[in-house]
Structures are given as C-alpha cells and as structure tokens.
Image (cartoon, helix red, strand yellow):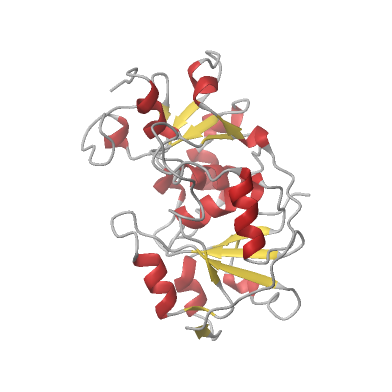
Amino acid sequence: MFMFPTIQMTDLQQLVHTDQIRWFDCRYDLQHPDYGRDAFKESHVAGAQYLDLSTDLSGPRSKTGGRHPLPSKEQWIGTLESLGVERDDFIVLYDDGFPYAARAWWLFKWAGHERVVVLEGGLSSYLAFDFPMSTESTVFEKSTYQADFKDDMLVQYEEVKNRSAETYLVDSRSPDRFQGQNETIDPVAGHIPGAVNCFFENAISPDRRLKDAEDLKELYADLLEADSPILYCGSGVTACVNVLALHALGKTDVRLYAGSYSDWISQTDEVAR
C-alpha cells in the first residue's frame, strides 16, 4: 500500500474526528540539542509525544557509523513499544520544518509502518488552525509492535564503497560543503568520490512545505531515471528529505546511506573536493 508521505493541515483537518491520530513532535536543533525537548515541554500539539533525534531517532555513537547512527532494530522497536505505537496507528510527524520529521518518517517506513506522514509546514501550519496545544504529557499503554523491516531501503559503507559505476550516488548537503568549503561540522571537508550534489533545501518552499510536483520533477530529473540511487548527507538526517520528496513523486526504490559522509570519513581517507 502506497501512502503519500506528507499531508496538508487542510486535509488533516478532515481526519482528526474520524481517525485515531498519533502525533509526534520531532523538533530539534543541531546547535542546541535541548531546544526540541524544551520547546515540547513549553507547548505542543495536544496528545503529542516527543521523539528526540539524539536519543530516539539515533543509536549510540561509536568510531564508525556517523554522527547520528541509526538506532538498532531492537532499540527502535523498543521506542515504539514504550510509546504505545500500534501497527495500524495513523502517525503524524512534525517539527519546525522538515528534516527531523523526515528522519522519523524514514524510520517508521523502515520498520514497515505504512500509515505515516509528515505535516507540511510543520508546527506553524497547525497553529494556523484552531486546534488545541498542551503542556501535558500523554502516556499510552505499552504496546507489542510487530515490525517488518525493509532493509532494501538502507545501504552500508561497504555497499557504497563497492558500488558499480552505474549506481547514482547523491550528496544532499549544501553546495559549499559538497565542494569542501565552509565545513564546520565534520573534521574532513569534501564529498564521497563519484557523488553528485542535490541540496535537500531545494525541495522545500519558504513556508517549509514540499515544492509542487513539477518543481520536484525538475529538481530530480536525473534521479528519477536512475535505478535504486543512494542518497546521503552529513549524518543521515537531511538526506531523508530528498528520500521523502522522491517518494512523493512515486520514486520508492531510493536507498539511504544512513552513516553518510561522517561514517565515510571515519573509515577511509578517500574524499573529493
């Protein structure tokens, strides 16, 4: 079953009284890691629970695996069960825009959860409607989650290193970081040799919604023709925006290199600028 990966608040408004919606707040700031959780405590969508990039949407860091390694399957299932998520729940994810909600979307899809969407426009689009906000914590009874992991959505370092010449490899970071300029996050500047650049922000409009289909088709013209392309970024977060946008166009054979550039440079000195 294919479900469009995002939803507009106008469409969601029709569902709030007819479906069991599970809201998840994914706000985060890489420069201020406590921001999202603090903002959630201050005010959030009524009934929402919080998913933290560093503790829920990522696993423990090690020498390899990147700055935001994926949680293990066991960890992710444990998170879903502790939050009381059921396989048939309709999941709505939001942040201040897209990247962190897109990472959560990818993890739900990886676990085989079909009914999951990212709210277009983020929290600000919700606030434009007369729906309640809350400071209260919502607790659901622990569930037993039967995951069906889709490992074909994922590639590891060795697969990227040994990919064929025909495999399309896409770097989702900003052009300057791709070119090895203004690198302030990772210790080695540059990109994986053979990659092309497609900045994730180019898929998002100023009001933090996906651009329309024609604009996305133009942005991803080469990608749409590629067979099972691989996408990466710095740590496997913002690349999920490109993955999600491609799904919106029906291109679902895209794969994520979750460790991304930060994993690559931890295992090799092969970089291009």
Q: Is residue 197 above or below residue 52?
A: above
The answer to whether residue 11 is seen in the rendering is no
Relative image position of residue 18 (x, y in whole percent): 76, 77
Foreground pick, 131 / 55: 55
> Please, is residue 45 above or below residue 259 in the view?
below
Question: Does residue 36 appear to the left or right of 16 in the view shown?
Answer: left
Total numbered circles: 0
Instruction: Compare residues 26 and 73 and report the one nearer the observer.
Output: 73
Using the image as rendered, state which of residue 117 and residue 74 is in the foreground: 74
Which of the pair 38/223 is nearer the observer? Answer: 38
Image quadrant occupied by the C terminus: top left
Instruction: Report the residue at 52% width, 24% height from top.
Output: 168
Name the image quarter holding residue 153: top right
Residue at left offset 34%, top offset 64%: 34
On screen, residue 209 above or below 59: below
Residue 228 spot, x, y in % from top left: 62, 28
Q: Is residue 147 visible?
A: yes
